[in-house]
Image (cartoon, coloured by chain):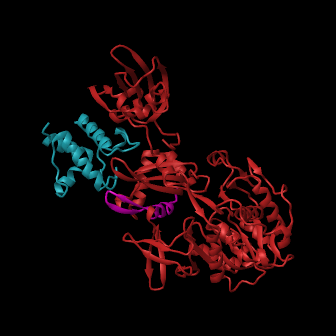
Chain colours: A red, B cyan
Amino acid sequence: MSNLSLPPPLLSASPEAIAFYRNRAPVSYAALRADLAAARQALARLEAPEVVLHDADAYAFLVWLIACWQNGQTALLAADDLPATRAFLPLPWVGRCEGSVLSDWSGGVADAAAFPGPGPRFGCPGMVVFTSGSSGTPNRIFKAPEQLYREAALLQQVFGSGLPAATRFAGTVPHQHMFGLPFRLIWPLWAGYPIISDYFHHPEELGRLESEPHVLISSPATLKRLAQLETFSSPASFLATFSAGSPLEDSVAAACAMRLSTRMIENYGSTETASVMQRIFPGGAWRPLPGVTLALDEQGCLKLRSPLLENDDWFQTRDTAVLGADGWRLTGRADRVAKIEGRRVALDAIETALLALPEVAEVRTAPLYRERDEIVAAVVLSDVGRAQLQEIGKTRFDRRMRQSLAASLERIALPRRWRYLSAMPYNAMGKVTSADIVRLFERQALPPFSVANRSAHEMVLTLALRDCMQAFAGHFPQLPVLPGVTQIDWALRLAQRYFPIEGRFSDLRQIKFQRILRPDDEVSLTLRFFPEKKEVRFSYASAHAEYSQGRALFAHPVLALDTVS
Amino acid sequence: MSDLIDEIKTLIIEALNLEDVTVADIDTDAPLFVEGLGLDSIDALELGVALHKRYGLTLSAETEETRQYFASVRRLAEYVSAHRNH
């Protein structure tokens, strides 16, 4: 397998030519080749066909990656080195990170003359990237080196003509995903442009770049902030700025184009597809890369064939698009289109409408398909929103939110359930999955029950515990017992359902758990309401025994901040 | 009548699986749809089914008359007490 291709400059560039800038110091091709030779040796000694690669230093990362491929090893890219990620990937970890077995290549001989060296000794050069799956489990996506090199060649073909050989590539995005890696590292490596290894967290750091031509690889997250930096200046010239990750707003693109005197280009692609098409601001339509064919399926979703995919099959996206006279326009994400009682509802439209409200700082919506289809919303409130929620309580605030949206959305699209969070549940990949949102709305189900006896202020409910086994789940494996908190939750919810209780739950008193409740216990719940005291007394009992009892107090006015209930 | 009003409020909460809404939260005289509780057309269908099961009422969603009975919990209670079969 000596036919493994390498980016041409690795073989042909003169030894003193500059491949990288690392901490502002130039790294020559001779040094890069020596490091690659050493890294190959160190990696080969692991005798592992698969390794996990994580290194915050882009230069070290790229050396490890190319060396893996030369050895015929597969590198799994980890977005972080958190304990959960390390447990999820029980393989040798390589790079400067927690739990690494190979944090540098000092174990190998750094000899540029030993580059490129012998053919691969393991079978499968490549890399695995993970995407957040809809179920919450990451999906593994394999990429062969040739797929990345082909992408680099296409990007150079389309965008390289105006870029002088000394153009430096700088990035404000990490290099471990399928935008940062091909755009920041593989493309310039393939085409021979020097790469700036440092990662510019804050847009103002771009002011420290030297007065040379640059290409900037960025994202709306950074560009949005850059657009607000009115005093920003940089000696660098930015020949082109690429953005990807989420849609780039026209106003942000315009502000950045002016601030950086740059050509703003938005990239569309995904981990699965690699880069698909680009558009140039202002107002340009999307233009597919050479060899990419686009079409729409019956649902109006984009599908594509691409030389960057592993085969020639159509790849179905979940993004909706239309083909206009001047080219493609993306109109939304189809996995962001829910079917609610047979009607199509665009989650993007709901979120846009919510974000326009002064009460809302951040929002995610999801469809929930249970007894009836409905939209649910998880919201991070603004200061204004938090103050209102505190003032009027969750029920009235929920209602107010629905009313505020009613002017811009059809009724079926209005969220029926709300959670107010202090922060969105971002996962390690910086995304909020639909599954994470849905999880916020899972509620401990009530057991099936029948009302045995009822008067205005007292009622007896017969509970069928064995038909509500989920309440016993995990508690405990050998001995299912109904948790005390669940007993209290059921009692309060049923009391609020049947008695006209004013105010909100405020306190528990005299809670006694006398006997454990098992699934086979035939138990009834007695609820007694004392309106003048705003108090509910509950007791779980069978014909033979008492299980638990307590008093719940309710109070007006509402002062507590309702969050996730 | 006030017992029936609370009963109907409970029925609405159960049938529509309204979260965080208690009997005390539902204003007896506020409109059920659009303003007030802000129920939608699917809620109207579900509520119709629940009223039919509980009280044997048959509502035709199309008539102006039905629309009036859905105007508030009080109107609904009046309608139920006049027309219930069981």
Q: Does any portion of residue A458 appear in the rendered image?
A: no
How far from the left and from the top, in percent, is residue B4?
23, 36
How far from the left and from the top, in percent, is residue A416?
39, 51
**In this picture, residue A141 sits left or right of residue A215:** left
Quadrant where the N terminus of chain A sits is: bottom right
Query: A255 above or below B24?
Result: below
User: How many marks overall?
Assistant: 0
How far from the left and from the top, in percent, is residue A91?
67, 49
Q: Does any portion of residue B29 appear in the rendered image?
A: yes
Q: Which residue is more in the foreground, A228 or A461? A: A461
Residue at figure coordinates x 39%, y 27% from the top left: A532
How far from the left and from the top, in percent, is residue A273?
54, 68
Q: Which residue is more in the foreground, B2 or A114? A: A114
Q: Quadrant of residue B40?
A: bottom left
Q: Quadrant of residue A323?
A: bottom left
**In this picture, residue A458 sits left or right of residue A66:** left
Query: A265 above or below A119?
Result: below
Q: Quadrant of residue A40?
A: bottom right
> Is A352 one of the magenta-colored residues?
yes
Residue stretch in magenta: A336-359
Query: A16 above or below A456?
Result: below
Query: A193 above or below A418?
Result: below
Q: Which residue is more in the foreground, A336 or A379? A: A336
Residue at figure coordinates x 68%, y 59% from the top left: A122
> Is A289 one of the magenta-colored residues?
no
**In this picture, residue A53 sits left or right of residue A385:** right
Residue at figure coordinates x 69%, y 50% from the top left: A81
Q: Which residue is more in the foreground, A168 or A131? A: A131
